[in-house]
Image (spheres, rainbow, N blue to C red):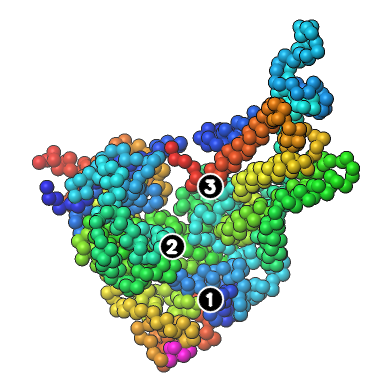
Amino acid sequence: MSNEYILQIKNLDVQYYTDAGIVFANNKINLELKAGERLGLVGESGSGKSTLALAILGMIKPPGGIAGGEILLDGRDITKLTEEETRQVRGREISMIPQGAMNSLNPVMRVKDQIIDSMIDHELGLGKAEMKEIVRDALEAVELDRNVGDMYPHELSGGMKQRACIAIAIAMKPKVIIADEPTSALDVVTQRQVMQTIRRIQEEMGAAVILIGHDMGLMAQFVDRLAVMYAGQMAEVAGKQQAFRSPMHPYTQMLIESLPKLATKGVFQGIPGITPLLRDLPPGCVFSPRCPQAFGPCRETTPKFLEHRPNQWVACHLYENENESEKARA
Amino acid sequence: MQRITISLRYIRRNVSLAIGLGIMIFLILFAVIGSFIVDIKVDPYPLAGPASVAPTFNYCPRTDPDCAQVEPVAYPFGTDGQGRDLFAVAVVGTWMTIRIGLLAGVIGLTIGTILGFTSAYYGGFYDAFIQWTVDVLLTVPGLLILIIIASTISGLEDGKTLTINQMGLIIALLAWMGPTRTIRSQVLSMRERSYVMMARLNGMSGMEIIFRELIPNLLPYLGAGLVGSVTGAIFASMGLAALGLGPLREPTLGVTIYWVINQNAFLRGLWWWAAVPITIVALIFIMLFLISMGLDEVANPRVRRAR
Amino acid sequence: MSELLLDLKNVTKQFKGGTVALDNISFSIDADNPSIIAVAGESGSGKTTLGMMVLGFLSATTGSVLYRGKDLTKMSGQENTDFRKEVQAVFQDPFAVYNPFYKVDHIMEVPIAKFKMASNKKDARAMMEQALISVGLRPEETLGRFPHQMSGGQRQRMALARALLLRPKLLIADEPVSMVDASLRATILEALDKLNKEFGITVLYITHDLTTAYHVSDYILVLYRGSIMEAGDVESIIRNPQHPYTQLLIGSIPWPDLDRVWGEDIAIIDIEEDTSLESKVGCKFAGRCPQVMDKCKVSPPPLYWPDDNNRVASCYLFEDKEILPGNDVGTLFQSKKVAAAR
């Protein structure tokens, strides 16, 4: 069954069991990713976005676990795979560009060996020569010189290390690339270069990218669609234009408002209050304590995540009434 | 109050620490309660009772034709070849051995901490000198030095053997080097932390920063360091004693082992003479090991097991 | 002649191993004109070193740092105490500045006691609560807690409350929002702005993020490898950068503005660094500059006025223009008085 969506997350629940109680890291997450699409996943620390990334990669370990829902990669539910099958999928069909490149590269292995290493693990049945070819292609794709493959990580600059990580991630031409704040440790000039490289590669390969971060500026320049998470739940998913120009969820609205823009020098619009702890979520809508537009049902029931406008999904009671009254009129 | 309940709940999860502390409490109770049962000045010493008696609760001297007429004497751990009541030896010796360990361990740790702290914080020539000294002394075989020192002291006056405290002090001589190194490296990393900068901005002086800011954060490492140095000290004291260089007049566990070897206990079939000190020493080491593993979990959250 | 709050005279800092973190930097801040001055640059620019030197944690290899006319290395005991009280800081990591062993009150209680700011516990407590309220925190939600029980934003605001409490004359803010979540940044920047506008505290805002620098500062110093590339009014520099390095920086910023595309308004040419110029004579940016000329490799350019705006750039592209007298960028920071008077 051909599906335009390469990745579909349906009602995903991820929980961690700690002494202090259950931490609801992800609650009823719904997200869809088309092939070749660039999706930005934003959220503050404590929003659950890193947990979501780990869940997609099948890397949630005890005391955490997937408590419900499914993740479909090309129609196949990867939450139900065995350990071995998950390992095969990871790296080959879904790969990750990690945050701190300095810590992700093995300091005692040459760059090319690290790429080959991950290929061997995946039992692709390739000969040595073929693998060398793939390494060359990968390095070329990230605009690194061929001889960089022979170097050790400490011989590379920050930007080059990050490119090496990208090369490892794309060597096997995955369908989905998860980039977890890949440029947070880089300076602004290198950041632009690395992001442009990622963009070029994913367009060439037709791979989909999930860019995780909290730099809205980066999102504005890079992604097609934006998914906003708050306190373990998906608040809003919308196309870039809609997200920035006509956001629906009050949290997204306030977030966009708080961004420093050239036109608004000297005006500071923060979001008052603090994010709730994931093990101590408020009743009803998790954003209600901080929401300036909260009303009755907000503190009682959790709003459903629905497509209230074409291609714009939001979990907010403000729009539920809208739709209901429209349905009533129809 | 809240801190206590949190600590207790934590101990329940930290199995090693729990068992280790459990053994420690058991040994403490054993020594304390035991000291009321036996006469600590008489029983652990030679000729306190009949010699070479196997463990029994009803001792009856063979010469006595009718055991019912005599008060039954209990020697639950038996007696050794020289008439020492081994139960009393266990009670008294445990505490003595631990005392040597504590004395040496605490002195060693204190010296090591002071040196490690000051050399890390002030740096410069002082630091280089201390480092050099430590590095050199660490290469010297410690047991050898201890043997030489111990045999010299005990040979100084005829018939005089070491006292417990002397043993403790001698071992302390070699116990300070390890802590110096570990504390120094901890302080070096802590010195760069922002809260030290903040303390300077608050107007604190160097010594103040060491005492008010750095030492409280070192407590887990100091705790682990104490356990380490006490373990090492007990080990060293056992080694010296077993070679005959311990306080031979005192019934420490190490000296008891010396007598076991010296008096051919096994050849004479007096297995209980060896079993007593060996079991207790094993318990002490297991206790120290578990406590140190438990403390490691406290100080290093990454080691904590996920349920 | 108003007193200079801070005066850096030809300050050079070289570390063991040869790295030159700051190269002949001179600038001053005058006491009459409390403003927010951004010190911006990438890693390796020397901005953090500058902050550390102003705080007295590092000493200059050559040149001198003067606070209110007194050289930092030659202060008497009392002068030192005054300096400590009057120059405070907020750091990047909101968690690391708290000693995890103590409750958060500790960071405020200690200086109150050390600088003898309150005569008894009640007064001290009142001062602390007042400061917390000023930055938008509730004393009952913060005092008495341990650092790990508060969120990053709260911790950073508390650090600002502490700074406010001490009523310093100069506040060094070293990347105060880079480790704070996006939604809380505005609140922290607002607090910094308040410290400056309401309490007259001069703020030295050290950052690599030009967007926040633009938002909160009046003036900016752009550093590259220890030298000043461009300095002056933040409006002129960010909207219309003249120095090639500043142009590259501004062009590379991903603005959260859908109408601005990365690198389109300023032609960005990515130059592979010419490492043969490691000899460090001449302009620091010569190895990467798309408009490099031969004379750039020979000696570093002085600061020129490229146009009528209140800013200078260190680039031979403007060699036919006027040079900044005295090489003291600080004179640019005084013009706010003139602007305010208009």
Q: Amino acid at mark 2?
A: Val
Chain ID at mark 1: C
**SS type, badge 2:** loop
**SS type, badge 1:** loop
Most foreground residue, B287 or C48: B287
The disc placed on residue A9 is none
Q: Quadrant of the N terminus of chain B?
A: top right
Q: CA distance from mark 3 to mark 2?
A: 26 Å
Extent of the magenta region = C295-301
Work out whether residue C23 can be spotted. yes
- Which residue is labeled 2 in the image? A108
**SS type, badge 3:** loop
Chain ID at mark 2: A
Please say if B70 is above or below B210. above
Chain ID at mark 3: B
Q: CA distance from mark 3 to mark 1?
A: 35 Å
Residue C333 on image: x %, y %: 50, 76
Please say if C193 is above or below B3. below
Most foreground residue, C277 or B172: B172
Q: Is residue C234 left or right of residue A295?
A: right
Q: CA distance from mark 2 to mark 1?
A: 27 Å
Most foreground residue, C151 or B273: B273
Q: Is residue C323 left or right of residue B175?
A: left
The disc placed on residue C19 is 1
Q: Residue at x 20, y 66 (%)?
A: A204
Q: Is residue C22 left or right of residue C41?
A: right
| Mark in front: 2 vs 1 | 2
- Which residue is labeled 3 in the image? B300
Residue B95 on image: x %, y %: 73, 33
Please say if A192 is above or below A211. below
Assess whether residue C18 is covered by the magenta stretch: no
